[in-house]
């Protein structure tokens, strides 16, 4: 498992980027938007959580 973790880290794939891509794909079904949101990573995840009904504010 550490080999996969090292490979993902070397490729620049972080948890925030993976979550952002998953959220973006589920909403837009677009590879371009998923790539853009993956680039922003945690910023997009936090934005999504703050702007959706039932997000961080309940």
Image (tube, rainbow, N blue to C red):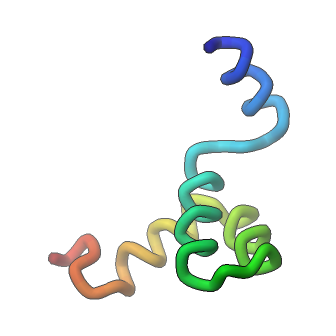
- Asked if 2 appears above or below 27 in the picture, the reply is above
Q: Taking 55 as reference, is 17 left or right?
A: right
- Write the residue at 68% across / 71% down: 37
Q: Residue furthest left?
A: 58
For residue 2, what is the image quadrant? Answer: top right
Query: Considering depth in this image, is 18 or 51 the residue closer to the camera?
Result: 18
- Write the residue at 36% across / 79% down: 50
Q: What is the x, y in percent for residue 52?
A: 35, 85
- Asked if 45 appears above or below 18 in the picture, the reply is below
Q: Quadrant of the C terminus?
A: bottom left
- Write the residue at 63% across / 60% down: 41
- Asked if 3 appears above or below 38 in the picture, the reply is above
- Write the residue at 62% across / 52% down: 18
Q: Taking 16 as reference, is 54 left or right?
A: left
For residue 40, what is the image quadrant? Answer: bottom right
- Asked if 41 appears above or below 54 in the picture, the reply is above
Q: What is the x, y in percent for residue 38?
A: 70, 63
Q: Quadrant of the N terminus?
A: top right
């Amino acid at each position: 498992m550490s080999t996969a973790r090292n490979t993902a880290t070397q490729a620049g794939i972080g948890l925030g980027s993976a979550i952002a891509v998953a959220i973006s794909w589920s909403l837009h079904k677009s590879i371009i938007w998923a790539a853009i949101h993956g680039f922003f990573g945690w910023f997009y995840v936090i934005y999504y959580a703050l702007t959706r009904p039932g997000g961080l504010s309940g």
